[in-house]
């Protein structure tokens, strides 16, 4: 018999909200809740794809990215409450393409690959929802590739900050703050850049009163969103 509370939790996940009760119960039968510690790895690049994960709740986030041989990292995405990740490997059966690391306090549900695939095969609504999610991620990936090819680093950073501001932010008296903590090295990982280059850009933005940065808590506040949008638009011809 399915865990009724887990079924209700799954129904609040964006990818599963349109599924009938029987499909949610099938997922719940192959799932369990987990509460990893801050900094705990969920899987590593090259691991077998044995599960899909969903973020149930918590102030923390899950960071997905990939290392290189020089010990640098590329942060691909940050997932928060309501998001699902780890589905790509389960769908194509190939090893994990990235690492997944817990940042802060977060509660997850781990859905076995078998339960996820069986539900996807039986429920067209899940297949359509998956297609929409993957299409959105593909569009974002293409945008990041285009930026990495043509845009200066400052423009790329401004666009990433605005993306994060739109998807996951908190209004405060000090300004609109990115909800997740981002060390300067984390911001560098978002762009495959060096920490020193990010610090240099942030210092310039602080001098221009575009942002403020709490180095102790690793919170970035946007003080002038219009000004940051102007940076994100890129340099004008002849400017």
Image (cartoon, grey):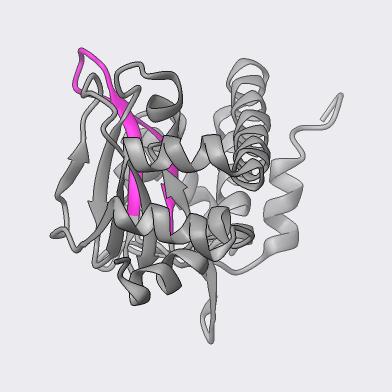
Q: Quadrant of residue 236?
A: top right
In the rendering, at what x and y percent does residue 163 appear? 61, 50
Q: Position of residue 58 (x, y in %)?
A: 33, 71
Residue range corresponding to the magenta coloring: 62-80
Q: Quadrant of the C terminus?
A: top right
Query: In the rendered view, does 45 fall on the left or right side of 167?
Result: left
Residue 60 or 154: which is nearer the viewer? Answer: 60
Question: Magenta region's main secondary structure?
Answer: strand
Quarter of the figure with residue 38: bottom left
Confirm whether the magenta stretch covers residue 69.
yes
Residue 140 location in percent, x, y?
63, 34
Q: Which image quadrant is residue 103 in? A: bottom left
Measured from the top left, where is residue 211 in percent x and y?
Answer: 54, 62
- Farthest residue toward the front? 1
Along the line of sight, the residue nearer the viewer: 205 or 150? 150
Residue 185 belongs to magenta span: no
């Amino acid at each position: 018999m399915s865990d009724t509370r887990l079924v209700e939790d799954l129904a609040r996940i964006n990818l599963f909200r349109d599924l009938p009760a029987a499909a949610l119960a099938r997922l719940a039968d192959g799932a369990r809740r987990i509460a990893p510690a801050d900094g705990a790895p969920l899987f590593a690049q090259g691991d077998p794809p044995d599960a899909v994960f969903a973020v149930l709740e918590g102030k923390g986030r899950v960071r997905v990215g990939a290392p290189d041989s020089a010990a640098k990292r590329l942060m691909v995405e940050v997932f928060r409450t309501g998001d699902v990740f780890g589905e790509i490997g389960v769908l194509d059966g190939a090893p994990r393409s990235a690492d997944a690391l817990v940042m802060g306090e977060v509660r997850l549900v781990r859905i076995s690959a078998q339960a996820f695939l069986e539900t996807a095969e039986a429920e067209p609504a899940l297949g359509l929802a998956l297609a929409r999610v993957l299409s959105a991620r593909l569009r974002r990936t293409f945008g990041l590739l285009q930026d990495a090819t043509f845009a200066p680093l400052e423009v790329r950073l401004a666009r990433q900050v605005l993306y994060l501001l739109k998807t996951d932010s908190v209004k405060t008296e000090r300004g609109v703050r990115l909800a997740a903590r981002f060390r300067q090295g984390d911001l560098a990982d978002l762009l495959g850049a060096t920490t020193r280059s990010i610090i240099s850009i942030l210092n310039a933005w602080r001098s221009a009163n575009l942002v403020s940065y709490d180095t102790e808590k690793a919170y970035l506040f946007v003080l002038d969103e219009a000004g940051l949008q102007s940076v994100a638009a890129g340099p004008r011809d002849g400017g």
